[in-house]
Amino acid sequence: MHRGGNIKLEINHAKELIKAGAEDIWGWNSPAGRERVKARIQWFIKNGNLNDGLNVLECGCGTGIFTRHFAKTGANITAVDISAELLEVAKSKCPSEVNFIQTDLENPKELTDNHYDVLCGISILHHLNLPLALLELRKKLKHGACFAFSEPNLLNPINKYMLFANDMEKRKRYGVSPTEMAFKPKELVSLFQEAGFKVFLLKHRDFLHPSVPQSLIPLVKGVQFIAERTPLIRSWSGSLWITGVKI
């Protein structure tokens, strides 16, 4: 299937997510989900080297659950999304200094060329026609700008057979739009390389599913620590975390 390329569909999908409770559907509000949020915030701040004065472009900010933490670093955050409704939710949760812009990441004409030091996003690239979007976003970055993204892994059994199944009714129940599709690891690396980026690292993360009960989180985190470092097993991780630079 082809990812992205349907602005109207994604805007309507965002409206449905808001009605159903976007952060609950995305799994950010459960005890295990909050652990996943915390891990991402720490990793993105470290790998983006977020600090005072940096111009950071957050792609697909959604409800701003990560945006407000990025803003605490003192970096100049520009947070974008295709959905005006999601941006309104994000604005209500974030400092006024954050610059929110509604734009299509496949044609981000509202953004300034050669301006950003950091490009980042959480679970957004799999909604896009990524070859097109990366070429367009590359124009907005300074030379040597770094990037960091986390994306669902298509080799994970839950992702492959439940969230990204061919059954459109099943996808709808889990809040998955008709045109979003997870990535295989080598595919994601190749797409960045072909668009003019150098990939430093791709990590397999997230064996801690949002549905794990709070009492079992310490046990699963211990298993996760081992699984993420074990060849073959780590290839079944829930997410792919990728970082590198524009060249």
Image: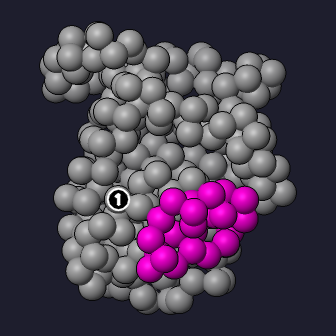
Q: Which residues are magenta?
A: 79-104
The residue to which callout 1 is attached is 69
Residue appearing at x 43%, y 89% in the figure: 114
Residue appearing at x 37%, y 41% in the figure: 37
| Circle 1 crowding by C-alpha within 10 Å: few under 14, some 14–19, many from 20 | some
Residue appearing at x 36%, y 69% in the figure: 71
**Whole-percent x and y of residue 52?**
23, 80
**Whole-percent x and y of residue 225?**
17, 24
* Quadrant housing the N terminus: top right
Q: Amino acid at mark 1?
A: His
Q: Nearer the viewer, residue 113 or 14?
A: 14
Secondary structure of the residue carrying tag 1 is helix
Residue appearing at x 40%, y 46% in the figure: 150
Q: Quick check: 71 left or right of 180?
A: left
Q: Nearer the viewer, residue 235 or 103?
A: 103
Q: Examine the structure image and report whether residue 92 is included in the region drawn in magenta.
A: yes
